[in-house]
Structures are given as structure tokens and as C-alpha cells.
């Protein structure tokens, strides 16, 4: 493990599950009875903005009642102590990586604590609620939506992710089902370049066959021991 230099870590909802945040495709993963694929779209927001704003307001409020777990803490330790390149790409919209102390983080699917103005395109820290139509701090219009990447929208940071994957000699995927692209395809990009690929997940993901190695178990156990192994 210590021969590696440049690492890309991809995290998904499974890393936050033991903090008490529901995953998307688990038994608790329905959004008011809907599949996430049916409602996390710009079309669903246009059809029923109140439903969508209420859902995100509730999830933003819920962030205050959860805390990072041992897996977030282990990645923060890796970030602090690893002197090679490291990019932690998270699909998660929570802030648990940052609250654990990690800095080299890229939120490819946006953040609950960020709001995006549909009138002037500005992004700003989100007020606690968007349901009551607060004004955009930049243009004053009540046109804020959650700064979250929905289906059909372009994820953030794709150029930076691509560049990091091109340099990586280790790609690690943690707590993601491999159901959503482009993140689900990163393992194949890495593998094509001969990068070592490792999966840490509760169960085999949809792309499990593409990994050199898969370790199954809870993130709070697998991630700290993986980080110990790397840091020696
Ligand atoms: C544990 C654990 C524990 C539990 N320890 N593990 C047909 C084919 C291919 C692609 C497409 C297609 N049709 C459409 C597309 C594209 C589409 C897509 O992928 N659709 C699929 C449904 C097929 N993708 C998009 O539209 C994306 N944009 C895009 O593609 O733009 C074009 C583009 C072109 C070229 C280059 C780049 C881009 C945008 C995707 C946006 C996803 N947004 C969401 C919703 C955000 C809203 C919100 O948060 O409310 O993001 S969807 C939802 O899924 C969320 C997540 O980030 C994402 C991934 O879910 P994740 O994290 O994997 O969670 P789960 O629940 O699925 O899995 C959890 C895992 O953890 C499980 O495996 C558990 O076992 C495990 N686990 N407990 C360890 N304790």
C-alpha cells in the first residue's frame, strides 16, 4: 500500500449511513414514496417546487443532528497525513467530510448548504429554508434552488476529477452502489490506465467486477483499517 503516491477516493451515501443519514437505494431510501430517479430532476422541481424545497429543507435541518463517523474521521486523517496527491470526490451533499476535518474534497453532486440562484446564476451559502422564497444575496430575486446536481444535469468538477484520475495510481470507492453515472464509470477509467482499484462497501456494488479488490463490511470498520494500512 505504501508504494502508492496519487490517490483518488470516491465516496457515496454508504459512508454517511452509520451517521444516521439514509442511503438512496436502501429500504429507507424512498423520497416520500418516490424513487430518487423520479423526483431528483429539474422537471420534478418545475412540476412541484414546494415538494422539492420541503424535502431539501428537512434534509438540511437534519444535518445539525448528525455527526461524522469513524470512516469520515479516517479519511480526514489520510488527508492530513498523506503527502502525495489526494482527491476525495464525494457524491454526498452532506458536510460530514468537512466536519471531520478533510480539506481535499470535491462535492460532485453539490451541497445541501449551498443555494443556486436561477435568476443570476450566483451561488451562496443556503439559508436554513428555501421554501419561503428568500431573496438571492446577489440580485435580490426570490429565485434560489438547492445547489444539488439532479439527473440530467452536469456534475461539478468533472475536469478536475478527470485530471486526478489520469494521475492516480490508486482508486478507492467507498459506500456507493455504482448505480449513478458518471461516478459509476470512474473505476473503468482508472482500470483502463492500469490504476489499482479497491472497493470498500457493505455489499458488492453494481460495478464490483471492475475492481481489483473488494472488501465487504461497514465503512466505519473498513475505512480506518485501510487508512492504517496506507499510512503504515
Ligand atoms: C454501506 C453502508 C455502510 C450502506 N458501510 N457501505 C443510462 C445509462 C447510463 C447513464 C444514464 C442513463 N440514463 C441516464 C443516465 C445519466 C444519469 C444516471 O446515471 N442515471 C442512472 C439512474 C442510470 N446521470 C446523470 O444524469 C448525472 N449527470 C450526467 O450524467 O450528466 C451528463 C454527463 C455527460 C458526460 C460526462 C459527465 C456528465 C447526474 C447524476 C445526479 C445524481 N444525483 C443524486 C441526487 C442528488 C439529490 C439528493 O441528494 O437528494 O445524487 S441521485 C443519488 O444517487 C445521489 C447520490 O449521490 C447518487 C449515488 O448514490 P450512492 O451514493 O451510490 O447511494 P446508494 O444508496 O445508491 O448506495 C449506497 C451504497 O452504500 C450501497 O451499495 C450500500 O450497500 C452501501 N452501504 N451502508 C459501507 N455502513
Image: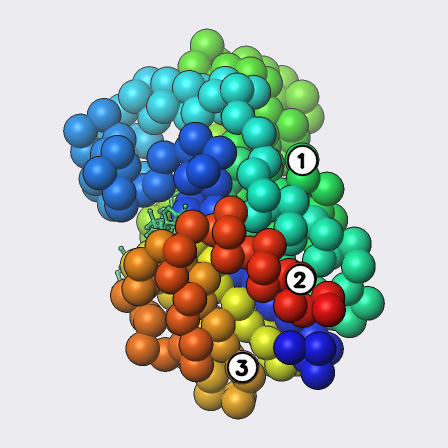
Please tell me whether mark 2 sits on a helix, a strand or a loop: helix
Q: Is ligand 1 less than 8 Å from the beta carbon at label 2? A: no
Q: Is residue 27 visible?
A: yes
C-alpha distance separating marks 3 and 2: 18 Å
The first of marks 3 and 2 along the sequence is 3
Looking at the image, residue 47 sits to the left or right of residue 108; the answer is: left
Q: Is residue 217 above or below residue 84?
A: above
Which residue matches tag 3?
Answer: 196
**Where is residue 100 shown, x and y percent of the image?**
67, 39
**Nearer to us: label 3 or label 2:** 2
Mark drawn on residue 32: none
Q: Which mark is residue 228?
A: 2
Q: Is residue 61 above or below residue 202?
A: above
- For label 1, the residue is 99
Side (left or right) of 183 relative to 100: left
The residues tagged by marks 1 and 2 sit, at their Cα atoms, a distance apart of 21 Å
At 36% from the left and 54% from the top, the residue drawn is 202
Identify the residue at the far left of this view: 33
User: Residue, x 62% and y 81% (percent of image)?
Assistant: 169
Q: Residue at x 31, y 31 (%)?
A: 46
Circle nearer the N terminus (1, 2): 1
Q: Secondary structure at mark 1?
A: helix
Amino acid at each position: 500500500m505504501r508504494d502508492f503516491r496519487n490517490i483518488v477516493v470516491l465516496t457515496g451515501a454508504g459512508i454517511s449511513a452509520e451517521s444516521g443519514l439514509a442511503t438512496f437505494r436502501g429500504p429507507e431510501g424512498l423520497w416520500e414514496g418516490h424513487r430518487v430517479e423520479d423526483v431528483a430532476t429539474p422537471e420534478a422541481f418545475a412540476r412541484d417546487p414546494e415538494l422539492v424545497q420541503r424535502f431539501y429543507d428537512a434534509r438540511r435541518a437534519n444535518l445539525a443532528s448528525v455527526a461524522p463517523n469513524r470512516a469520515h474521521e479516517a479519511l480526514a486523517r489520510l488527508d492530513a497525513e498523506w503527502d502525495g496527491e489526494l482527491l476525495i470526490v464525494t457524491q454526498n451533499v452532506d458536510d460530514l467530510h468537512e466536519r471531520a476535518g478533510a480539506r481535499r474534497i470535491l462535492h460532485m453532486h453539490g451541497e445541501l448548504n449551498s443555494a443556486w440562484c436561477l435568476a443570476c446564476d450566483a451561488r451562496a451559502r443556503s439559508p436554513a429554508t428555501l421554501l419561503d422564497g428568500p431573496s438571492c444575496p446577489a440580485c435580490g430575486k426570490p429565485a434560489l434552488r438547492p445547489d444539488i446536481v439532479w439527473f440530467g444535469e452536469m456534475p461539478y468538477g468533472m475536469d478536475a476529477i478527470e485530471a486526478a484520475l489520469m494521475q492516480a495510481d490508486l482508486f478507492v470507492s467507498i459506500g456507493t452502489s455504482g448505480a449513478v453515472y458518471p461516478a459509476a464509470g470512474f473505476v473503468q477509467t482508472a482500470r483502463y490506465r492500469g490504476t489499482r482499484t479497491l472497493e470498500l462497501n457493505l455489499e458488492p456494488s453494481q460495478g464490483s467486477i471492475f475492481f481489483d479488490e473488494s472488501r465487504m463490511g461497514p465503512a466505519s470498520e473498513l475505512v480506518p483499517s485501510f487508512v492504517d494500512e496506507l499510512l503504515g
